[in-house]
C-alpha cells in the first residue's frame, strides 16, 4: 500500500499467505485488467456499504463493520501466540507496544515475522473453511 493511501502516511507491504493466494486465484477476473476486485473493469471496486449489506444478508449476521475484520484478525493472531508488536506491524500500526526510544531507533520492518503471522492466520482460516 503506498504511503499516500495509508492512514499513518507510511508505505505498507502485506505478504499474502498461501491461503489468501488460493482464495484470490478463485476470484473471476476480467481479461487484461489489473484489478482483482472490480465491477466496472477500468476502476477498483467501490460501494463497500452495499457489499457489507449483501454479506450481512447472505450470512444472516448484522451490525458489523469492515474494521471488525481487522479486529478479528488481530485477536485471532494473538490467540495463535503471534507477538503483539508483529500484529501491529501486520496492521500497519505505529503507536503501540514499540514506543518511545525503541520506536525512534527500531526501524526493522518485521517482514519475515509478518509473513509467518499471516501464514499462521491463513492456515487457521483454511482449517475453519474445511469445517463448514
Image (cartoon, rainbow, N blue to C red):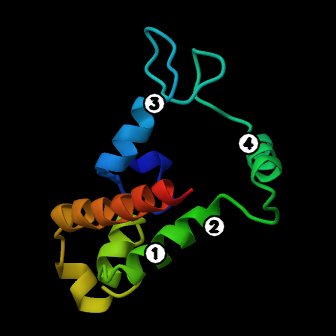
Say the numbered circle drawn on residue 35. none
Q: Is residue 100 above or below residue 122?
A: below
- Left or right of 44, for residue 63: right
Most foreground residue, 77 or 107: 77
- Look at the image and tell me whether residue 3 can be seen: yes
Residue 76 badge: 1
For image coordinates 63% across by 63% down, the residue present is: 67
3D distance between C-alphas at marks 2 and 3? 24 Å
- Residue 26: mark: 3
The residue identified by callout 2 is 68
Identify the secondary structure beneath mark 1. Answer: helix
Question: What secondary structure is marked by label 2?
Answer: helix
Relative to 31, residue 99 above or below: below
Q: CA distance from mark 1 to mark 2?
A: 12 Å
Query: Residue 95, percent across and down?
Result: 41, 80
Q: Quadrant of the C terminus?
A: bottom right
Work out whether residue 16 can be spotted.
no
What is the CA distance from the residue labelled 4 to the residue labelled 1?
Answer: 23 Å
Q: Are marks 2 and 4 in contact (CB under 8 Å)?
A: no
Amino acid at each position: 500500500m503506498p504511503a499516500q493511501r495509508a492512514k499513518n502516511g507510511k508505505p505498507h507491504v502485506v505478504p499474502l499467505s498461501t491461503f489468501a493466494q488460493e482464495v484470490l486465484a478463485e476470484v473471476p477476473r476480467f481479461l487484461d485488467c489489473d484489478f482483482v476486485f472490480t465491477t466496472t473493469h477500468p476502476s477498483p471496486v467501490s460501494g463497500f456499504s452495499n457489499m457489507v449489506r449483501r454479506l450481512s444478508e447472505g450470512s444472516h449476521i448484522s451490525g458489523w463493520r469492515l474494521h471488525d475484520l481487522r479486529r478479528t484478525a488481530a485477536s485471532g493472531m494473538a490467540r495463535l501466540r503471534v507477538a503483539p508488536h508483529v500484529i501491529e506491524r501486520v496492521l500497519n500500526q505505529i503507536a503501540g507496544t514499540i514506543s518511545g526510544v525503541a520506536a525512534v531507533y527500531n526501524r526493522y520492518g518485521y517482514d519475515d515475522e509478518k509473513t509467518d503471522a499471516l501464514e499462521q492466520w491463513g492456515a487457521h482460516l483454511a482449517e475453519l473453511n474445511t469445517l463448514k
